[in-house]
Amino acid sequence: MPQLQLPFFPAGMTLINANVGFHREDDTITYFYGHLPVFRHDVDDHRSFRMFTSQLYINGSVKQAEICRAFGIPAINVKRSVKVYRDKGIAGFFKEPRRRGAAVLTQPVIAEVQRYLDQGKEIAEIAGLMDLLADTLHKAVRSGKLHKPKKKL
């Protein structure tokens, strides 16, 4: 027969609600359900924080407003995290974000610009020929995507 477990929290505990709390010790945050530790992560591990607080909400252990109040974060942050959890699961928090690829300087364009540079043309001239901004080409040279040939003395 199941027994009723009274919530018992150690000293220094911050309550999220009557059943759930967390405790920070050094650089680690530990979450407790009653007196049982249920999850732990580093203070700077924001992905784990978002994942676990979303999981607490999805499981019905806490309300979104309680998370906002306990951690001092905006409600929209919690709502976004819950949406990620519902749509993509736990893996959604740990995937690298998608980055936009090269919009102007694609590999064929870089190859053509480099060919012009190797022929000795100036960046301003190449930009005019290829309908590009000279600043874009200068930035590519500084980042190492393109290289100017050494001038002969």
Image (cartoon, helix red, strand yellow):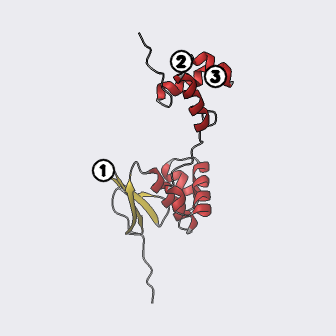
Choose between 89 and 129: the one closer to the eye: 129
**Of callouts 1 and 3, which one flags the residue occurring earlier in the amino acid sequence?**
1
Q: Badge 3 local density, few (<14 within 10 Å), some, or many (20+)?
A: some
Number of residues whose C-alpha sits closer than 10 Å to that of mark 1, classed few (under 14), some (14–19) or many (20 or more) = few
Element type where label 3 sits in the image: loop
Q: Residue 10 sits in which quadrant? A: bottom left
Q: Which residue is mark 2?
A: 120
Image disc number at residue 112:
none
**Residue, x 48% and y 59% (percent of image)?**
16
Measured in 3D between alpha carbons, the distance from the residue under mark 1 to the one under mark 2, in whole angstroms, is 60 Å
Q: Is residue 68 above or below residue 136?
A: below
**How far across and down, in percent of the image, does residue 103 sit?**
63, 36
> Contact, CB < 8 Å: mark 3 with mark 2?
no
- Work out whether residue 99 or residue 101 is closer to the camera in this orientation and state it: 101
Whole-Å distance between the Cαs marked 3 and 2?
A: 18 Å
Q: Residue at x 63, y 33 (%)?
A: 104
Q: Is residue 25 left or right of residue 14?
A: left
Residue of label 3: 133
